[in-house]
């Protein structure tokens, strides 16, 4: 047990930095012992600003993936020379967006998240980045559509697994879908440096049609494919849509597609 705890501490120290590791451990004890219900702050050397985390939620697991396991560190200098625009589809509570904004200090970013509770925390977490980030309460879709949140439980049912679906006849929408060409046009940029997609299976919708309108304007795609969702097997449409335009590598659950030069 002592060895395991030591190894965990060293992993945290390497990923977060020493001060942030101490803060992380203190917050962990505080949450478990005091059973606080209010969001608390976490820090990382990979985020310029502290980040809010909801207790008893999937937020801590998302934080660990991004800032402790550092799953986006797979994006090296060889993959992309300069980053201007990042679009974060399925931005959850803003952790991945904070990582990108910190690591690419000259970029601007569009964060898209459909779940209202997640989006509320995202707004707070990304507020310090000012006009470098545009926050959109919506979901990325392949075509104009009225959407609502799905009632079906997906995977662990946590906050990071929220799914959307198209509204039924006479059903009032909770959000209006957006699409990648619209986001790109509104950004004022000519291309997307990094397109990050983690949308719980709806990528099968995005890459099933109209992807020809924007796929040639993306330098790097970072995506988590879901083959077990209500939308069907995403890998069956993703790879054919990309064709031979990208060089693929893999890091944990992530697939990184870098455009051939």
Image: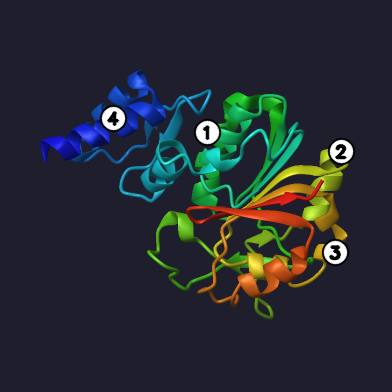
Quarter where residue 76 is shown: top right
The residue beneath circle 3 is 212
The residue beneath circle 2 is 188
The residue beneath circle 4 is 10
**Nearer to us in this view, 99 or 11:** 11
Can the viewer see residue 136 in this picture? Answer: yes
Cα separation between marks 4 and 2: 43 Å
| Residue ID at (59%, 77%) | 232
Q: Nearer the viewer, mark 3 or mark 1?
A: 3
Can you say whether 220 is above or below 164 in the image? above
Point out residue 170 in the picture as x, y percentages from the top left corner: 68, 78
Task: Classify mark 2: helix, strand or loop.
Answer: loop
Cα separation between marks 1 and 2: 24 Å
Q: Indicate left or right for 191 with 74 as reference.
A: right
Which label is found at residue 125?
Answer: 1
Q: Tell me which numbered mark, 4 or 3, is placed earlier along the sequence.
A: 4
| Residue ID at (43%, 34%) | 52
Cα separation between marks 3 and 1: 33 Å
Q: Tell me which numbered mark, 3 or 1, is placed earlier along the sequence.
A: 1
Q: How is the image coloured?
A: rainbow
Q: Tell me which numbered mark, 4 or 1, is placed earlier along the sequence.
A: 4
Point out residue 156 in the picture as x, y percentages from the top left corner: 37, 64
């Amino acid at each position: 047990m002592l060895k395991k705890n030591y190894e965990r501490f060293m992993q945290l120290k390497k990923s977060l930095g020493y001060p942030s590791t101490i803060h992380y451990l203190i917050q962990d004890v505080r949450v478990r012992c005091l059973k606080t219900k209010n969001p608390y702050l976490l820090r990382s050397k990979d985020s310029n600003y502290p980040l809010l985390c909801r207790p008893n939620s999937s937020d801590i697991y998302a934080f660990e993936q991004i800032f402790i396991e550092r799953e986006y560190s797979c994006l090296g200098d060889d993959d992309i020379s300069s980053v201007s625009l990042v679009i974060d589809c399925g931005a959850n509570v803003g952790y991945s967006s904070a990582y990108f904004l910190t690591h690419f200090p000259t970029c601007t970013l569009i964060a898209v998240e459909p779940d209202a509770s997640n989006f509320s925390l995202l707004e707070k977490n990304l507020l310090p980045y000012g006009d470098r980030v545009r926050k959109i309460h919506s979901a990325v879709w392949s075509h104009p559509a009225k959407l609502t949140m799905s009632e079906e439980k997906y995977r662990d049912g946590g906050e990071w697994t929220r799914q959307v679906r198209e509204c039924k006849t006479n059903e009032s929408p909770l959000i209006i879908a957006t699409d990648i060409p619209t986001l790109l046009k509104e950004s004022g940029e000519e291309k997307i440096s990094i397109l990050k997609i983690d949308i719980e299976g709806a990528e099968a919708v995005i890459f099933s049609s109209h992807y020809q309108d924007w796929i040639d304007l993306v330098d790097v795609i970072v995506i988590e494919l879901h083959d077990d969702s209500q939308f069907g097997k995403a890998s069956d449409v993703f790879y054919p849509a990309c064709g031979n335009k990208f060089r693929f590598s893999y890091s944990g659950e992530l697939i990184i597609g870098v455009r051939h030069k």
